[in-house]
Image (cartoon, rainbow, N blue to C red):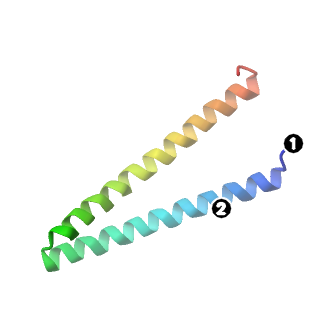
Amino acid sequence: MTDPKKIERTRRILALSAVVIMILCAILTLVFAFLKFFTGSAFYASAWKASAWSMFVIPLVLYGMILIHNIVTKNEKEGKN
């Protein structure tokens, strides 16, 4: 059916991409905060808020997706489609 090595490779790629996205969000939040502080621009204030919000929401969404996946695969293994 499905190759376990391919599934493991896909999981590693997805995990690495999630880590890269979170690091980029952290860097952007820091940069926008500094730019807001030094320039006082309204754009950077909004960008900082959006970046900080995404640092909070993206992990929650990823956690919810993992939780739903675990519940669905558990039900499939038990035969409760």
**Looking at the picture, how far across and down is residue 62, in whole percent?**
50, 47
Mark 1 vs 2, N-terminal side: 1
Query: In the shown orientation, is residue 51 left or right of residue 81?
Result: left
Query: In the shown orientation, is residue 61 left or right of residue 27?
Result: right
Residue that lies at the very extreme toward the right in this rendered image: 1
Disc 2 marks a residue whose amino acid type is: Ile
* Other-residue count near label 2 (Cα within 10 Å), few / some / many at <14 / 14–19 / ≥20: few
Residue topped by disc 1: 1
Rendering quarter of residue 1: top right
Front residue of 70/3: it is: 3
Identify the residue shown where x is 72% and y is 27%. Answer: 76
Residue at mark 1 to residue at mark 2: CA–CA distance: 21 Å
Identify the residue shown where x is 32% and y is 67%. Answer: 29
Q: Secondary structure at mark 2?
A: helix
Rendering quarter of residue 25: bottom left
Q: Secondary structure at mark 1?
A: loop
Residue that lies at the very extreme toward the front in this rendered image: 43
Quadrant showing the C terminus:
top right
Rendering quarter of residue 15: bottom right
Identify the residue shown where x is 57% and y is 42%. Answer: 66
Residue topped by disc 2: 13
Disc 1 marks a residue whose amino acid type is: Met
Residue that lies at the very extreme toward the top in this rendered image: 80
**Looking at the picture, how far across and down is residue 65, in whole percent?**
54, 42
**Looking at the picture, how far across and down is residue 46, in whole percent?**
22, 62
Q: Which mark is residue 77?
A: none
Q: Are marks 1 and 2 in contact (CB under 8 Å)?
A: no
Identify the residue shown where x is 23% and y is 76%. Answer: 34
* Other-residue count near label 1 (Cα within 10 Å), few / some / many at <14 / 14–19 / ≥20: few
**Looking at the picture, how far across and down is residue 24, in whole percent?**
43, 69
Whether 26 is drawn above or below 34: the answer is: above
Query: In the shown orientation, is residue 72 left or right of residue 6?
Result: left
